[in-house]
Amino acid sequence: MPAIPSIDLDDAALRASLARKIEDATALLRRVAAEYRPAALANSLGAEDMVLTDLIHRERLDIDNFSLDTGRLPAETYELIAVAERRYGRKPSLYYPRHELLEAYVRAHGINAFYQSVELRKGCCHARKVEPLRRALAGKKAWITGLRARQSATRAGLPRQVFDEVHGLEKFNPLADWTEREIWAYIRLNDVPYNALHDRFYPSIGCAPCTRAVTVGEDIRAGRWWWELPETKECGLHFRGQKTDDRGQ
Ligand code: SF4
């Protein structure tokens, strides 16, 4: 479903299912805050992560909220960071690439080398996302993501809790069983801020040069790294090994 789904906020069945999902997600977030301190939400600033930000704020849970500023984010994403700061009253924890890593990469390969090969694209993702994520997760007992099972075929069977062997901590996906309609119903009902690009057929938003709008009938993630084959589309933030799950953000 490429565009924001139209939501009938008077739909009793939708509201009932949403109420159950909110209850479940909130219970899980409370448990994470109580049992896995320090824990952090890896906020990609997508619609799902804004729902989680709102739930955590509403419950006043002791869970950190960080984002990775790759330096190549769309202007609309920076605007959302500023809007969310005003709405929730806390400055975002932003993590940046290590300048020496990034400078070496750009000097060697060029400013837009990610279009040239999968290897160079992964090198850029490593410097701008993977390495900063490691620093963001250092010392944490758990991290939380907004991944959902229905975002793509590769996310089917996504667990709500899994041990992340790569980073060595517990990983929680409280929205794993939420539908797209439930996400947007929550956003509408609670007036949650979201990225303006969602209104322009960007269902999944990452770095500006690696994200495009999708058309009717295309997969939600068709606009991410669209020049690559589907099986290479992951940036290394999420891994699916024997015991971990894997998705690009
Ligand atoms: S998404 Fe694109 S610009 Fe962003 S880190 Fe990965 S390759 Fe680089």
Image: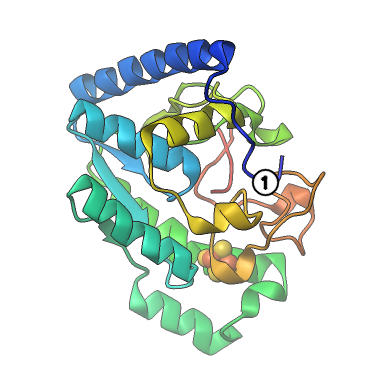
Quadrant of the rendered image holding ligand 1:
bottom right
Count of numbered circles in the view: 1
Q: Position of residue 208 (x, y in %)?
A: 56, 69
The disc labelled 1 sits on which kind of residue?
Answer: Ala
- The quadrant of the picture occupied by the N terminus is top right
In this orientation, does residue 144 appear?
A: no
Q: Position of residue 48 (x, y in %)?
A: 47, 38
Given the current orientation, which residue lies at the most extreme front position?
10
In this orientation, does residue 32 appear?
A: yes
Q: Position of residue 15 (x, y in %)?
A: 50, 16
Residue under the image location 43 percent in, 67 percent down? 70
User: Which residue is label 1 attached to?
Assistant: 3
Give the answer, above or below, for where 249 lies relative to 52.
below
144 vs 55, nearest the viewer: 55
19 vs 38, nearest the viewer: 19
Residue under the image location 25 percent in, 20 percent down? 30
Q: Position of residue 82 (x, y in %)?
A: 30, 61
Residue under the image location 79 percent in, 55 percent down? 229
